[in-house]
Image (cartoon, grey):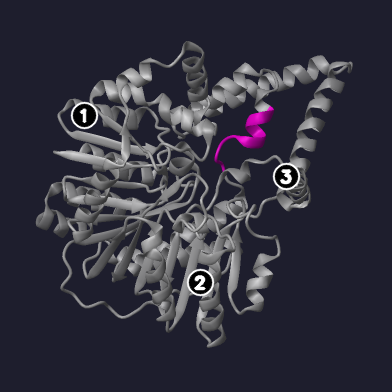
Amino acid sequence: MKKRRVQSKIGRLLFHRMGIGGALIIAQIILYVMGLLVLRDSVIFDKVEWLFLALSVLAAMWIVGNKSNPGYKIGWLIIVLGLMPFGSLAYLLLGGNHLSAFNQRRLGVMERKIYKNLSGECGRSASLGELLGEDAGCMAHYLEQTTRCPVYGNTRTKYYPVGDVCYDDILDALRRAERYIFIEYFIIEEGKLWNSILEILAEKAGRGIEVRVIYDDIGSMATLPSDYPARLEKLGVHCRVFNRFVPVVSLRQNNRDHRKYMIVDGKTAFTGGINMADEYINVKRRFGHWKDAAIRLEGDAVWSMTVSFLAMWDFTHSEEEHFTPFRPAPARGGTVGYVQPYHDCPWDNEPVGQSVYLHLINRAKRYVYITTPYLVIDYSLTVALTNAAKAGVDVRIITPHIPDKKTVFELTRSHYEELLEAGVQIFEYEPGFIHAKNFVVDDRFATVGTVNLDYRSMFLHFENGVLLYETPSVADIRDDFLDTQTKSLMVTLEDCRSISMPHRTLRDLLRLFAPLL
């Protein structure tokens, strides 16, 4: 019986588009290798070898001269120069982050729409600095200038320490929708969570309410059939897929839509680490208890997230649309603190997610508490964390004890020793996998969002988050961290130094290629 189940799973995988696409990519790689082997016996091999040698040198010069992260450059330089003369072929197919002329035009349109709809509201950072101090003003000013994301008052926030407690509030908000529902997620999977949401979406669409869904094709490849958009359209739910997977070895697959938005009428929005799949609400067990986080916004700041969604919606099909009809009336005042939703685009050479994290670390006076599923950090983040700890700031990080990706888990642990030596405290969440991407600083500032502490999130993916300035939710995020710490194992220097030499060498090798994983 067990053998039949295994055979059935293998069969489903082979005939699933994921299996077919993987087979086609493997076939292409084999063809490339065979082509190179055939060339070796050709009379023109010497000329081809010199051509690729020249391309490798040019690729190395391009890598050194471009504006990408230094760690990402080093990883690709090792491949290009280590596999000379044909390393350049790998970089041309898979490396870099450059855009086609078509995507450059689309990106320009996307940026203009965000600028048109949000830039008029920027400029509040100066008054925020007067109210909350220079640190708050500088962080807000950075996001206003680089992303055109304003800072808002008149916005209530509610923090959710696990996806389970967020579930009922999401359904309640959707049931209250009167004008539109916008949903954008990296992963959507049929199950209790998504099916209960989809039932409401179909009912609302049937009543004439505008319902739109965006999901990432790679993120949902294993969970949704290729014709899923058509199925949703039959229900009256408009659907678009970000960056359709094409089974061709190509760098265009590097960039994914990792954002999480659920927006109702421009008045209520949810975001955080939670995707639309049952493990995120612990209905399905995958890696022990799934510890995630989400935050709900109600009020003026939701407009910024709505503009971000609409810009991505138009980007996916190169459409022109006026955003003004979707704008809600201003919210009532009386809230405490300020909120600044932000988004990050991998094509503008501005690492917004990483910069927000660096701002928070560098401005911490008493403590910075971090939860992250992955700790694959570059030199700048390592220096920021170690310098903060050496300066007497209480720096604590919680990572998973049960990994979802073993290779990335080894990379995460490879960073422990250096951080611990500087005084950073590290804990692993013993009950399972922690997927929350939270920072909280000095009881004053916090961020909840989608940005992992790894190269893909910070440099290759579309991401989003919410920066909080002295809102009541900041204390909730702090308390959740401290509670989670009590359920976590403290990592010691002795733990790190007891690793065998072969294991340590493996981790060192993985760190060389960390930017590419």
Q: Give the crowd class for mark 1: few <14, some 14-19, many >=20 residues within 10 Å.
A: many
Q: Is residue 177 above or below residue 8?
A: below
> Mark 2 or mark 1: which comes first in sequence?
2
Q: Is residue 243 above or below residue 329?
A: above
Labelled disc at residue 197: 2
Q: CA distance from mark 1 to mark 3?
A: 52 Å
* Relative side of 504 to 55, left or right: left
Name the amino acid, label 1: Ala
State whether residue 337 appears in this view: yes
Residue nearer the viewer, 90 or 377:
377
Q: Position of residue 447 (x, y in %)?
A: 29, 51
Name the amino acid, label 3: Lys
Tag 3 residue: 2
- Please report the bounds of the magenta region as a residue range: 89-98
Of the residues tagged 3 and 2, which is closer to the observer? 3
Q: Residue at point 44% right, 67% down? A: 262
* Relative side of 319 to 182, left or right: right
Q: Residue at point 25% right, 52% down? A: 477
Q: Residue at point 19% right, 54% down? A: 475
Of the residues tagged 2 and 1, which is closer to the observer? 2
Q: Are marks 2 and 1 in contact (CB under 8 Å)?
A: no
State whether residue 247 appears in this view: no
* Relative side of 333 to 436, left or right: left
Dot 1: element: helix
* Relative side of 263 to 197, left or right: left
Residue nearer the viewer, 219 or 72:
219
Tag 1 residue: 389
Q: Position of residue 32 (x, y in %)?
A: 78, 30
Q: Per the image, is 96 magenta?
A: yes
Labelled disc at residue 260: none
> Mark 3 or mark 2: which comes first in sequence?
3
Magenta residues, dominant SS class: helix
